[in-house]
Amino acid sequence: IVPLCIVAIVFAVLFEVYKDDFERWMKPVSDWLKARESWSWTIPTAILVILSFPPLFGHEIVQLIVGLAYPLGVALGIACAGAVIGEAACFIVFKYFFTGWVEKKIAQKVNWAATARVTQEAGFRGVLVIRYSIVPPHLANPLFSCTGMKFWVYMATVVLSLPKSMVFVALGSPSSKNSKAAKWGKVAAIAVVVIITIFASMWIRKKMAVATRTIMAER
């Protein structure tokens, strides 16, 4: 867990160091989006919604590009809208169309069963911690939606975990628009999210270990 968080910090630092190169590579894309700003925001929003369904991934890359292409306020709105709509759609689709498949996986795979057990026992707190841990939230969403969790509880954890998305948007914002204070603010925000992720990952790892032992004993 800790090594992965160190990798995240190193990535953030290297990204900031080579930010100008990233901006140059992505300039054609960002220019195209900026020229159509009145409606182009729907494109990254739709992509974020689609990427909310497992086993797809790549939210962070889209959020970096959004941060580069749009003003910070608009970029944050796009990232948050994509996350909220995507997570809601994922919950509804899996709850009403794939519950049987998820229950079969829970019966077959100990790690699925352990995650479901932790979710059911810890409730709101457990789901929120999972969202801040190194576990990709959209991979755990099918379990959240198919194990009896209420929709409003699920969505509350989505909203409270939005700061993770905001960090990537801020990280992607153009260097030329960032003052020294803004850059230090980004570093501080990344540090806070990484620290929360470390403690969340430690907590969920401990809970998963206990649940796994209990399930294996029951089986």
Image (cartoon, rainbow, N blue to C red):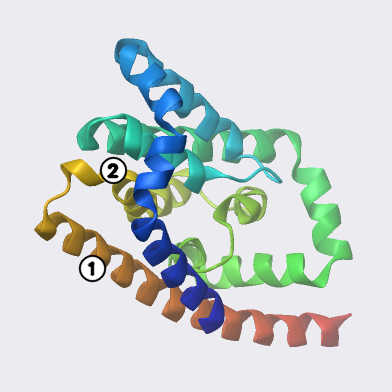
Q: How many marks?
A: 2
Decide if residue 93 is in sight here.
Answer: yes
In the image, residue 134 sits, relative to residue 94, either above or below, namely below
Q: Secondary structure at mark 1?
A: helix
Q: Pinpoint residue 35: horizontal percent, then vertical percent.
A: 32, 13
Q: Does 176 sit left or right of 165 as displayed?
A: left
Q: CA distance from mark 2 to mark 1?
A: 15 Å
Determine the residue positioned at 18% across, 64% down. 184
In the depicted view, which residue is nearer to us: 156 or 35? 35
| Type of amino acid at the residue the image marks with label 1 | Ala
Residue placed most toward the observer, 179 or 112:
179
Q: Which mark is residue 173?
A: 2
What is the quadrant of the C terminus in the image? bottom right
The residue under the point 51% across, 72% down is 7
The reply to whether discs 2 and 1 touch (Cβ–Cβ < 8 Å) is no
Which residue corresponds to the image point at 35% horizontal and 60% vertical from the top-left?
17
Examine the image and state in which quarter residue 42 appears.
top left
Q: Position of residue 136 (x, y in %)?
A: 58, 58
Of circles 2 and 1, which is in front? 2
Look at label 2 and name its amino acid. Answer: Ser
Report which residue position mark 1 lands on: 188
User: Where, quadrant-wise, is the N terminus in this rendering?
Assistant: bottom right
- Residue name at image x 10 percent, y 59 percent: 181
The answer to whether residue 83 is visible is no
* Image: 106 above or below 172: below
Report whether 97 appears left or right of 66.
right
Quarter location, residue 176: top left
Kindly indicate the quadrant of the structure image that contains residue 71: top left
Q: Secondary structure at mark 2?
A: loop
**Label placed on residue 21:** none
Residue 188 x, y percent position in the rendering: 23, 68
Q: Earlier in the sequence, mark 2 or mark 1?
A: 2
